[in-house]
Image (spheres, rainbow, N blue to C red):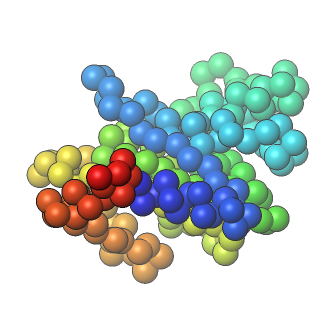
Amino acid sequence: RLVAEHVVRAAADGAQVLTGGCLELSGGGLPYAPFAEAFRSLRPNELPAFAADLPELGMLVPELSALRPPEAALPPGADPMLQQGRLLVGVRALIERLADTRSVELVLEDLHWADASTRDLLTYLVNTVEQPGLLILGTYRSDELHRRHPFRPMLAELVRSARVRHHVLEPLTDPSTRNLAAELIGP
């Protein structure tokens, strides 16, 4: 609810809000799911021209396939580490370019369900993006993080970073929950 209110206010203030969420799947998380969902809201005219030259971005932004010449497609058997590196750099370039002209807020929900690829991309962005007009807002549920949860090490690193502000929201008390419900649905 708090993030939803923030998103509405940010959009009203003129920010471009890109929102995506991680999914809980039985076989693990879907690679880059929140980024793919967030970028799906981009219209073709919002995509910078250079994006068509980065075939790896086509994994997250299918609209780029129409802009990309066939010779720019990924070669079969390309090195997966090289592909991932180019994807990380491409996503960074894309969001920095979007933030050149207006504020951009990238909202990533339910990071406790994030797969390793999503965690890697988020870690890369947090540690490399220098764009003043960009805010990355991530949410997670602390009650979902068991002792060996794969998100815990990343969270520990993020909390130590001077670039990150970490806010813990305590659960509502019973009286607060009743007051909120009364406000939302009436007495």
Residue at 82% over, 46% down = 46
Residue at 17% from the left image edge and 51% from the top image edge: 143
Question: Left or right: 2 with respect to 26?
Answer: right
Residue drawn at x 57%, y 37% is 37
The picture places residue 85, in percent across and down from the top left corner, at 58, 46
Instruction: Where is residue 168? Give x, y as percent.
Output: 28, 68
At a point 57% along the width and 32% down the height, the residue shown is: 79
Report the side of 136 relative to 78 (left or right). Answer: left
Observer-nearest of 11 and 101: 11
> Which of the pair 38/125 is nearer the observer?
38
Can I make out residue 58 in this image?
Answer: yes
Task: Pinpoint residue 6: horizontal percent, then vertical percent.
Answer: 52, 62
Residue extending farthest left: 147
Decide which of 73, 114 is in the foreground and name it. 114
Q: Quadrant of residue 96?
A: bottom right
Based on the displayed image, in which of its 4 quarters is residue 59 positioned? top right
Q: Which x, y percent locates residue 68?
A: 84, 29
How many numbered tags mark residues here?
0
Using residue 30 as the reference point, say whether residue 73 is left or right of it: right
Position of residue 157 in the picture relative to residue 51 (left or right)? left
Tell me if residue 36 comes above or below residue 110 in the rendering. Answer: above
Inspect this view and state whether residue 154 appears: no
Instruction: Indicate the quadrant where residue 162 lies.
Output: bottom left
Residue sticking out furthest to the bottom: 162
Which corner quadrant holds the N terminus? bottom left
